Structures are given as structure tokens and as C-alpha cells.
């Protein structure tokens, strides 16, 4: 069931769990995540970066694929198609293409420009029943060529953005995209608590969910984080299992060169990883 993400995140905030946002890169990724959500009766958010959207043949192609799978695979749990770290123009294109949720990442702009652009995206998206995520304080690491240092968002700026009618907010609390370095200081829970105090009953988003220790994830959820983004971990396990397939020369057995057989171990690895994350986030059996 294709829906906007606002209701599922409000429910998560009330229920003290988080909904997983898992990035998709192709058909295998999409199918693995949808099937795992259905098997575990969990709401889910399919994240699409601008780079992945382009790779998959454009935003309309992505929407068509997801809609087709929901129908053909009989997916009844709530599913949102969400633009991840969207530019101003990218967010507009995804709204037109039929995404049910968009993130406009204006964190690279001065706060007044971020507010101005976010406001325009909110008006456009809400007129079509589409939910909006905004960002304050760049998330560290690299995401589609955008590099951030893992800033701590300014709580007053978070308050100003939250008052624009957005549905959920990504605020930097020391989290980064990709693999965390050994000298990473961890999440700043004091900053998270202060931000939450300013924005009230609005779900928060934790980007860079790969590699954050489980106890930190659970504490973040208890402090109001209702959406957690995971991408790198799925990419790592997919690649590991695909590599193993070739190292074990399975492509040389019978019709082992068939791409459906080549991609299957990686597909199964994504399913296992997504289920593991849903257990940690507490979203299993939370689909209404």
C-alpha cells in the first residue's frame, strides 16, 4: 500500500519505535525490502537518492516499478517512496513523478535560504498529499557527492524549519554517511534532547544508520527519532555475497552465469540485513 510517510512516522513517535528507510538501487533491492517488510508486518520507506533515480532510468521508472511490485507481490503494509537528500529541482521532479514523500536537503544553504526553499517545497508537496523531510546541520560523510563533516544542528534553526509545516526533520547530531571512522565520538544526545525540546511533537530522522551501535540507536529512538536511514550496510552485504559467489566459482556450475542466480545471494543478504534492522528499530508487527 503506497502512502505518504507522515502518518507512519507519527505512529512510530507515539509507539517509541522507528521506521526503517532503506535505499533502493535496482529491482533486487526493491523486491528484497518490500518482501521483508511484508513478511515482518512492518511499515517501510524506500529511499531513492538522485543518483540512484538516474541509474534506474528516471523517477517515473522507479514509481512504476514500486507500484507494480506492490500490486503483483500483494504488499499490504504501508510503503512510502521517498527522495533522499533531494535538491530543490530534484524534489520538484519527484513530486511530479508520483513519489509519496520527498526530502529537500537545504543544509548547504544559509538558514534563510534553506527556509525559503523548504517552504516552497512544503506548499507544493502538501497540495498533492506528499510528506516532506527537511534538514538542518549537514550530515557527515559523502552522499551523492555532497560531503558533510557531521555537524551538530543549531536548535534554533531546527525550530524555525519545523515551523514551516514540514512532516519530519533530519538534524545533524554527529552522525555521518558511510562507514564510521574508529575515532568517531558517537551521537550527541544532549543536542538531540535540546532539538527535540524546540520542535515538540515532530518525528526526527537519523541519517547514517550504518554502524551506529544498537544501544545508541535505541536511545535515539527513545528521544524522538522515528525514521532511521540505512544504505551502506545493505551495499556491503550485497557485495560480500556476490563476491563469494564468484570466488566459489558458482558462475561456472550449470547455468550459474544467469544474472538471476548471480544476484540471488546478495538479494538474500539484503533481506536478512533489513529484518535485523527492523528488529532493532522495533517496527516489526507495527503495520496498521
Image: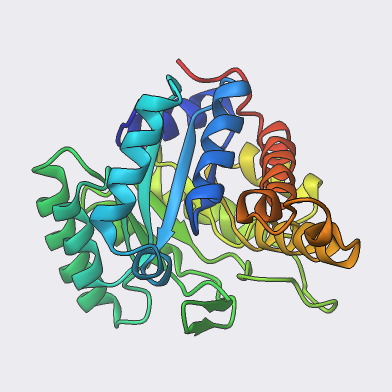
Q: Nearer the viewer, residue 137 or 243?
A: 243
- The residue at 24%/68% (across/down) is 90
Image check: 235 left or right of 169?
right
Q: Position of residue 168 (x, y in %)?
A: 37, 47
The answer to whether residue 224 is seen in the rendering is no
Where's the C terminus, which quadrant?
top left
Quarter of the view holding residue 188: bottom right
Image check: 58 left or right of 188?
left
Q: Nearer the viewer, residue 76 or 108?
A: 76
Q: Nearer the viewer, residue 38 or 132?
A: 38
Q: Is residue 278 above or below residue 171?
A: above
Q: Position of residue 131 (x, y in %)?
A: 27, 44
- The residue at 41%/51% (across/down) is 198
Colour pattern of the rendering = rainbow
Q: Position of residue 206 (x, y in %)?
A: 56, 54
Where's the N terminus, which quadrant?
top left
- The residue at 75%/61% (across/down) is 242
- The residue at 28%/44% (across/down) is 64
Instruction: Report the number of discs.
Output: 0
Residue extending furthest toward the front: 254
Image check: 135 left or right of 34?
left
Quarter of the view holding residue 85: bottom left
The answer to whether residue 264 is seen in the rendering is yes
Q: Position of residue 108 (x, y in %)?
A: 36, 81
Amino acid at each position: 500500500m503506497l502512502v505518504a510517510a507522515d502518518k507512519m512516522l507519527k505512529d512510530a513517535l507515539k509507539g517509541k519505535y522507528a521506521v526503517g528507510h532503506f535505499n533502493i538501487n535496482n529491482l533486487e533491492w526493491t523486491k528484497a525490502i518490500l518482501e521483508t517488510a511484508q513478511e515482518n508486518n512492518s511499515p517501510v520507506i524506500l529511499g531513492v537518492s538522485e543518483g540512484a533515480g538516474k541509474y534506474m532510468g528516471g523517477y517515473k521508472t522507479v514509481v512504476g516499478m514500486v507500484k507494480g511490485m506492490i500490486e503483483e507481490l500483494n504488499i499490504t503494509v504501508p510503503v512510502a517512496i521517498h527522495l533522499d537528500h533531494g535538491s530543490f529541482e530534484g524534489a520538484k521532479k519527484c513530486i511530479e513523478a508520483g513519489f509519496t514523500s520527498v526530502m529537500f536537503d537545504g543544509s548547504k544553504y544559509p538558514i534563510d535560504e534553506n527556509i525559503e526553499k523548504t517552504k516552497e517545497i512544503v506548499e507544493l508537496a502538501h497540495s498533492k498529499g506528499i510528506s516532506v523531510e527537511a534538514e538542518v546541520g549537514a550530515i557527515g560523510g559523502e552522499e551523492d557527492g555532497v560531503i558533510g563533516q557531521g555537524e551538530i544542528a543549531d536548535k534554533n534553526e531546527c525550530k524555525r524549519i519545523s515551523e514551516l509545516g514540514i512532516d519530519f526533520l533530519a538534524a545533524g547530531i554527529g552522525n555521518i554517511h558511510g562507514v564510521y571512522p574508529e575515532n568517531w565520538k558517537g551521537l550527541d544526545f544532549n543536542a538531540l534532547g535540546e532539538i527535540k525540546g524546540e520542535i515538540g511533537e515532530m518525528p526526527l530522522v537519523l541519517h547514517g544508520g550504518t554502524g551506529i551501535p544498537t544501544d545508541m540507536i535505541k536511545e535515539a529512538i527513545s528521544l524522538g527519532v522515528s525514521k532511521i536511514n540505512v544504505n551502506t550496510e545493505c551495499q556491503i552485504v550485497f557485495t560480500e555475497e556476490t563476491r563469494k559467489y564468484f570466488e566459489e566459482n558458482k558462475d561456472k556450475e550449470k547455468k550459474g552465469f544467469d544474472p538471476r542466480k548471480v544476484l540471488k545471494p546478495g538479494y538474500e543478504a539484503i533481506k536478512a540485513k533489513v529484518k535485523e534492522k527492523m528488529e532493532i528499530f522495533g517496527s516489526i508487527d507495527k503495520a496498521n
